[in-house]
Image (cartoon, grey):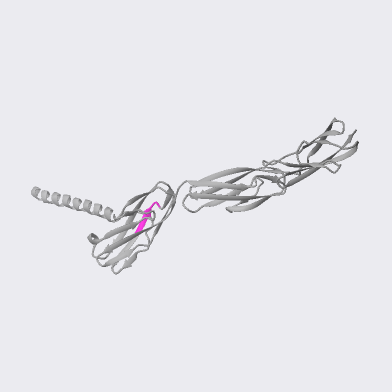
Amino acid sequence: MMPKRGPIRGLLAASLTLMSLALVHCNDDNQTGGTPTEPQRSGSLSVSIAATPTSGRAPLEVAFTSDVSGGQGRDSYIYSWAFGDGTASSEANPRIRFTNGGAYNVTLRVISGNDAVVSSPVSVRVDGDVRLSCFVEPEEGSAPQTVSFRGEATGGNGQITYLWRFGDGATSSERALDHLYSAPGTYLATLTATSGTASATCADEIRVFGALTPVCKAHSTGPLSVKFNVVPNYCFRGGCTYSWIFGDGSSDGIERPQHVYGAPGTYTATATVKTGGATGSCSITVTVN
């Protein structure tokens, strides 16, 4: 009975070897990826593709797989991938690195003999850095003040959402709009632009003033001579403009004029101050001898 065991052991070893080879072959034919596209056909030739992952932050490495059947057989297939970023590949299952943000529609064209078919596209969304600029005009004014806001964002994955916070409790998802500040105050307006997992924020300070209420001052500097001064409670960054009327029919357009009256008497001088869209005035009575 002992000599019969040798052939049995040899048959068992051969069976295990065949099983191992079958497992290796199975793994090669079933490369995994994302959800495959709907198969596209031309004659007997059929193709579908998949990608893993289909979204992420740049630089993003994506593995593409193809499922091709029919035509004149596997050895006849010619692969032509188009990745939507200007690059291509002739491999059956390429790995591609996307370095820039954007939305890419990837397709595969397969030729086999006289048959050619293009797959349905797989969309790959890559999140790049978001670059953001904000524009605010004006940055200061008197209440009620309407301010124009505009944001310009680039990068990301090509789809960008906006969120303005105006510093007074109001918000907006518009890219560009006008906002009314009804009360005086200093407001920090921010804009956040988001694209996928990437975002950027910019900020600007808005100063809204109340009524412009200048104070007029004067003191005598000699016979019939008076030095006037007007002090506004604020001036915008562009400065204030001034206009004096001295009560004797004469006027001047500076902040601190020196005026000589032609005769003794009591006069009421008025100063008008303007800055931006705000206007205020004050008066003072002087007696000269």
Left or right of residue 195, residue 265 in this image: right
Q: Which one is nearer the viewer's eye here, 196 or 272?
A: 272
Q: Which one is nearer the viewer's eye here, 94 or 83?
A: 83
Please count the marks in the image.
0
Q: State the residue at coordinates (74%, 46%).
A: 278
Q: Position of residue 268 (x, y in %)?
A: 87, 40
Q: Is residue 201 above or below residue 112?
A: above
Was residue 218 drawn as part of the magenta stretch in this picture?
no
- Image quadrant of residue 124? bottom left
> Dividing the image into 4 quarters, which one contains the C terminus?
top right
Q: Which one is nearer the viewer's eye here, 188 or 276?
A: 276
Left or right of residue 122, residue 161 in this image: right
Q: State the residue at coordinates (9%, 47%).
A: 2
Q: Position of residue 40 (x, y in %)?
A: 34, 65
The dominant secondary structure in magenta is strand
Left or right of residue 33, residue 285 in this image: right
Q: State the residue at coordinates (15%, 52%).
A: 11
Q: Is residue 111 above or below residue 234?
A: below
- Image quadrant of residue 273? top right
Magenta-highlighted residues: 49-53
Q: Position of residue 69 (x, y in %)?
A: 28, 63
Left or right of residue 204, residue 29 in this image: left
Q: Residue furthest bottom?
A: 43
Q: Residue furthest top?
A: 222
Q: Position of residue 195 (x, y in %)?
A: 50, 50
